[in-house]
Amino acid sequence: AELKEKDDLIAKQDDTDRLLVDQERQLKQAASRFRDLEVQMRQQEQGMKEVQSKYTAEYSLRRELHEIVQELRGNIRVLCRVRPLKPAEYENGDESSIVYLPEECKLRLTKYNEGPFADMYQEFEFDHIFPETSSQEEVFAAVKPAVQSLIDGFNVCIFAYGQTGSGKTFTMEGVDDNRGVNYRALDYLFDVVGSFPPTVEADMEISMVEIYNETVRDLLAERPAADEKLQALDIKFSVKDNSGYVVGLEMRNIENMEQVEGVLAEGHSNRATASTRMNEHSSRSHAIVSVFLTLEKRRTVSKLHLIDLAGSERLSKSGCTSDDTRLKESQAINKSLSALAEVIASLQRRDKHIPYRNTKLTFFLQDSLGGKAKTLMFVNL
């Protein structure tokens, strides 16, 4: 019995020794795998650093080349878009347009289609002209380089200018099944930002204001009551940023196009419109959709302003002279448009003094009009 018990103890000890040897072997294998994983992690970290370095170098080169191209084109570009004739114009017998395109970037306006003065005309030159058959895709193709400049850190302004009914809002907003510049620009931004490496963090915010009778109103602010007007806001000047900003402006963070559509729909519902002789639903204010893009490690925020300007027609043509409210609106609109033209002309002449402070519109946009900022103006006819 003692021998059997001794043998059992020896067998158990042998089993324990074998188990310890097996565990020691497993520990050595685990340590070896851990060392291999450490080597792989270091290699992956090095690979990530190399990819990041290559991405940064390629991004800097592409940014530099893009900026050269934009400067060659000009930081201020004026594009023209000609709308097709409306059904009402056909009904009135206006079956031929007074707009002709004799050359690629030249436009000719005639006052009369026939008669002794049919040969009288005026010619204008633009950086690009979109004929009445042009599509929204073709229009945005000309805008895309300016949107790319936003990603590269430059401020950008895109305007739509013209008389009421000339197609400004269609150019900027479009319709549900044929979106305009605003939606396409934001969709493009999301695509580009989504293609960044995981190490690059991006944040996008949006605001929407209107300038009505030289009063700034936040279109995303909550109305106190249904019958009350939106609160007027002040524009202040930041010496640090060398720009104007709206005090108390509502900012919304956006991460996808569904959020964008909701924000823009909310803002448009609050915009001031009225009926004029030119259009049953004439926009009586300048609507400004502003996108603020912040990229990681960038000290400043780049801004994209998408501006649907109010109608530029004369007072007599709009039929507002007999209505004091409409008359005041039209006078404020024409004053601000004239001031905008004066600012752009001063920038092109490289004047020492640029009259940004003459109106709220130019005061608000001043850091996105001069310097290395990119400006695109659509003249809608």
Image (cartoon, grey):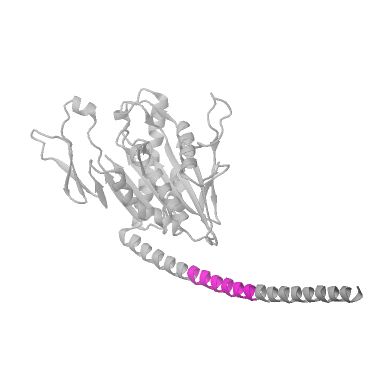
Taking the magenta stretch, the answer to whether it contains residue 41 is: yes
Q: Is residue 326 left or right of residue 9?
A: left
Q: In front here: 59 or 166? A: 59
The count of marks equals 0
Q: Is residue 97 left or right of residue 205?
A: left
Q: Residue at horizontal 53%, vertical 50%?
A: 237
Against 305, is 8 above or below? below
Q: Residue at horizontal 37%, vertical 44%?
A: 181
- Figure quadrant of residue 180: top left
The residue furthest front is 1
Q: Residue at horizontal 57%, vertical 73%?
A: 40
x, y percent for residue 334: 37, 37
The residue furthest left is 116
Look at the magenta stretch and give its main secondary structure: helix
Segment colored magenta: 32-52
Res 215 visible: no
Q: Is residue 8 left or right of residue 207?
A: right
Q: Residue at horizontal 16%, vertical 26%?
A: 93
Q: In front here: 23 or 332? A: 23
Q: In front here: 61 or 88? A: 61
Res 95 visible: yes
x, y percent for residue 233: 54, 38
- Figure quadrant of residue 5: bottom right
For the C terminus, give its image quadrant: top left
x, y percent for residue 300: 52, 58
Against 160, is 347 above or below? below
x, y percent for residue 374: 39, 55
